[in-house]
Amino acid sequence: MTFADHLAAARATFRAWLDAVPEGGRVVVFCHFDADGLGAGAVFGRGLARLGLDVEVVSSGRDESAFSEGARERLAALGPDALVVTDLGVNEAGTLEPAVPVLYVDHHRPSGEPAGAFVVSGYDWDPIPCSAWLAYDLVVDVVDVADLDWIAAVGVLSDLGDKAPWPMLPAVKKRHTAKWLKETVALVNAARRAPTFDAETALDALMAFDDPKTLATAESPAADRLRAARTVVKDEVAEARKAAPMFSERDVAVPDGIAPDGLRFALVRVHSAAQVHPLIAQQWRGRLKEYPVICANTGYLDGIVAFSTRAARRDVRLPEIYQAIDTPGWNGRWGHGHDQASGGHLPPDVFNAVLDALGFGPEAHVGG
């Protein structure tokens, strides 16, 4: 299927979900806490409200799966007549089905589909759109949200970079300037990366402001919190960049069709209360192109190793590699995401077992 064919089918799914929403019903939008997820959440939140729906947008918690019992209880307590789950994956476990119609909008590798759900997954599209891009392309088909294109651009720039293939990006950059869009990306992402984890302030800003320059230059307590978070994250990243990588000692046993010429991993260990591990893994990815790079952070969550993996190699499919590793009690709870970007949160002993499976020696282990 072409991109246009996928989009047409996705818009039909979105309209079918809308038809299932009670007239004037209450819709909860549940989004991931990064700039792409918050951008998608804000586009849905502001767009659906223009259709006369009562909409509340909430972000996921710091260590929360959309498919956990805790998330289900939190969402049910909000009393939705319908639910949108965006940038949080698609999993056969589901959320609130069949009590309410649930729409999933996502671009990560899916893990099955919940029975009765409305699913828009961009994972197998070419190019793969991020969640904010998908959200905008769906909502603009049913209501005028042209003034919200900058919010979608924040998600696109954050997830796909300055040369993202979103057709609207050049025009949005010209109208709002790349400077203010990128400044907004940095502020929105800093809110969840800082030790204070203040994704709600970033979400509120995307829901309230009319353009990125106003958001980035506002004089308010909320804007001050975003700028303070950015300063903290910058300092934490600078410290984490001092850590040197170590390398696995043998090739990894991988599923058929992945890295047929052999594969070894690199590991960078850091200890930071900020969510710096995705940034550090991404930075080393560019320098160690033959190695998927794991950045393991022992300071982000108490008693847990938070880790991100980034790979430059296109013959690597990280979720398949990770989900082939047996982690009793934790199988299916980590190692999702994209082919070249994955990770999770594991206790130290389980994470060390993963390192063993990836060919690292005992010197790579993290402490309990």
Image (cartoon, rainbow, N blue to C red):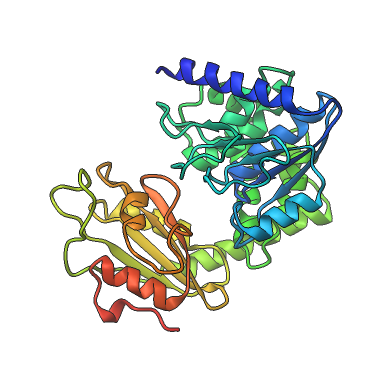
Q: Quadrant of residue 262?
A: bottom left
Residue at (57% x, 77% y) in the render: 302
Q: Quadrant of residue 158?
A: top right
Q: Residue furthest left?
A: 261
* Residue 181, placed above or below residue 225: above
Residue at (70% x, 21% y) in the render: 146
Q: Quadrant of residue 250?
A: bottom left
Residue 185 shown left or right of residue 342 in the figure: right
Asked if one can make out residue 223 in the rendered structure from this viewpoint, the answer is yes
Relative image position of residue 173 (x, y in whole percent): 59, 28
Residue 17 shown left or right of residue 155 in the figure: right
Which quarter of the rendered picture does the C terminus lie within? Answer: bottom left
* Residue 366, placed above or below residue 291: below
Name the one closer to the observer, 198 or 252.
252
Name the one closer to the observer, 365 or 197.
365
Relative image position of residue 362 (x, y in whole percent): 27, 81
Which quarter of the rendered picture does the N terminus lie within? Answer: top left
Residue at (84% x, 25% y) in the render: 23
Asked if one can make out residue 244 in the rendered structure from this viewpoint, the answer is no
Name the one closer to the observer, 300 or 345.
345
Name the one closer to the observer, 171 or 44.
44
Q: Residue furthest bottom?
A: 368
Relative image position of residue 328 (x, y in whole percent): 40, 69
Residue 222 shown left or right of residue 280 in the figure: right
